[in-house]
Image (tube, rainbow, N blue to C red):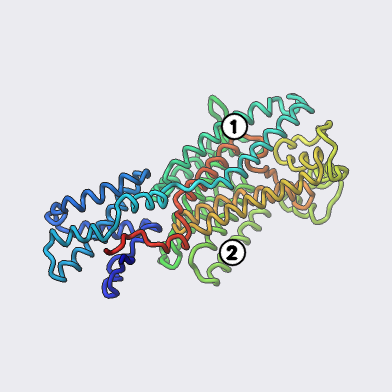
Amino acid sequence: MKRWWKRPAAKASESPALASLMQQTAEASESRMTANASQTAPEQETMSQPITAFLQTVCEQIRTKKAHRSVRRELEGHIADLVEELMAEGMERQEAERVAVARMGDARDIGRQLNEVHKPVIEWGLIGIVATMLGLGLFYMYVLDLRMGTSFTNTDLFADQVLFAVIGIILAGAIWLYDYRSLARKSWLLYALAVVLMLYTAFLAPAMNGSRVFIALPFGSIHAMMAVMFLLIVSNASVTSVREWTFQRTGAELLARVVVPIVFFAATNAFVLLALYLSSSLVQLWILRISWQQKLVTTASGLSAMTLLALLKPYHLERFLSQIFPSAEGENFVVSLLSAHIKEAGWFGNGPVALDERLAGLHSEGLFSVMIHTYGWLMGIGFSALVLTFIVRAAIIGSKVRDPFGKLLIAGLVSIMGLQFVWSILMSLGWAPFAGVSMPLVSYGGNSMLLHMLAIGLILSVAKQQRVSSGERSSSLVGKRA
């Protein structure tokens, strides 16, 4: 009669059960590598032919080549433990190895199950949401081109957006194939690149509308400070638990990740991006394992910094006060136009009729008002529900991630995108000050589209590495004892 093979209780702590293979982390892999490295060369060379054949057959069933090394290490560890137990019972090594391999079970069956475990996870739900948003963006660029013509922005919105979307999809697919975990080892390289971009924009970039955020290139321009924001968020995801920091480490991290960005974002007049960056950084910090006191103090400090920065320029205060005390001629004039644009929309809207050309940001910051103006509150509510679904879905993916770097990466990227969606929607409704915030994936813009699609690719790359649920892990992959 066959039964599940179980190791003796005395040995249980020496090597994890094979079911844990399905939830391998980088730490577990490194631990096994260290253990194997401690073995002598002769011991490695004396691996018998049955063991070699067993491992080879298992790996042949696993299509993900990168998983082969970790699978081999884990299986070798289990077989070695079994061989030691059998030899302690009086068996010769050769016979013990043969019996140990037999007890592991059918190699092909184990390999097929492990192939399912290591098969990349594709988040079709999130992909579907992103595809819907891209489609809506293209549709509304076509509507704006159709009703207002290229004279509206002196460009072909629809054709450009199609090009941006195609390039963005290619970039997201390439990042999905990339192992995001390697970015953790390059975090300071990403930070150094962000510093170089900040220095260039602060001192060499031309001023445009009072800001120095773009770098001119022969084929166009790059929104350097938006790229800096994403580089810093990815770099911040590699930060270890604050509990492990010394006083010197704490000072260095605050200087590098808070003070330096504040100085350069302020110097380039990119206060909106700075607010997005600080808000996203606070979200990442709250996910770190720190005390509630540390979280509250840090949050209060971050909010104080953002408030102080908002007061550095008089128009920031005027814009905020005009939102509290509206006036037809105040700083909230654009917000008033956007909200007035949708007041008479009704449930089904006015259709793609002529739009108010005074609102030059209808293709970007004011796109949500266009949605409601053309197809009514049903469209507005439906799109808001789509945004909420995107945020919740991405948050669920992040909650399942065990890798601290991946969890912080998703938290930072989703918080940036979610805040942009929410602010742009509230701004169009007249419930938030006008701050030039457009909606990711939907509003017009090459820089925004490409950077946000890269962010989507990173989120999907993190999700790809996740394995089956803990309930499915409970079934043992180890063979049965005869």
Q: Is residue 72 visible?
A: yes
Q: Position of residue 181 (x, y in %)?
A: 41, 49
Q: Residue at x 42, y 47 (%)?
A: 119
User: Do residues under tags 1 and 2 come within 8 Å of each other at their CB atoms?
Assistant: no
Which sits in the foreground, 382 or 264?
A: 382
Which sits in the foreground, 460 or 23?
A: 23
Q: Position of residue 340 (x, y in %)?
A: 85, 44
Disc 2 crowd, CA 10 A, few/some/many (<14, 14-19, 20+): some
Q: Residue at x 67, y 43 (%)?
A: 439
Q: Residue at x 57, y 42 (%)?
A: 452
Q: Quadrant of residue 103?
A: bottom left
Instruction: Indicate left or right for 11 with 471 as reference.
Output: left
Which amino acid, by three-letter code, is at mark 2? Thr
Residue with the mark numbered 1: 164
Instruction: Indicate left or right for 356 with 434 as reference.
Output: right
Determine which of the numbered discs, if any, sits on residue 299 in the image: 2
Q: Is residue 202 visible?
A: no
Q: Position of residue 121 (x, y in %)?
A: 48, 48
- Spatial CA distance of label 1 from label 2 is 36 Å
Of the residues under marks 1 and 2, which one precedes in the sequence?
Answer: 1
- Asked which secondary structure carries label 2, the reply is helix
Which amino acid, by three-letter code, is at mark 1? Phe
Q: How many marks?
A: 2
Which sits in the foreground, 41 or 49?
A: 49
Q: Mark 1 vs mark 2: give the one in front.
A: 1
Disc 1 crowd, CA 10 A, few/some/many (<14, 14-19, 20+): many
Which sits in the foreground, 469 or 153?
A: 469
Q: Residue at x 31, y 53 (%)?
A: 71
Determine which of the numbered discs, if any, sits on residue 315 in the image: none
Q: Quadrant of the C terminus?
A: bottom left
- Asked which secondary structure carries label 1, the reply is helix
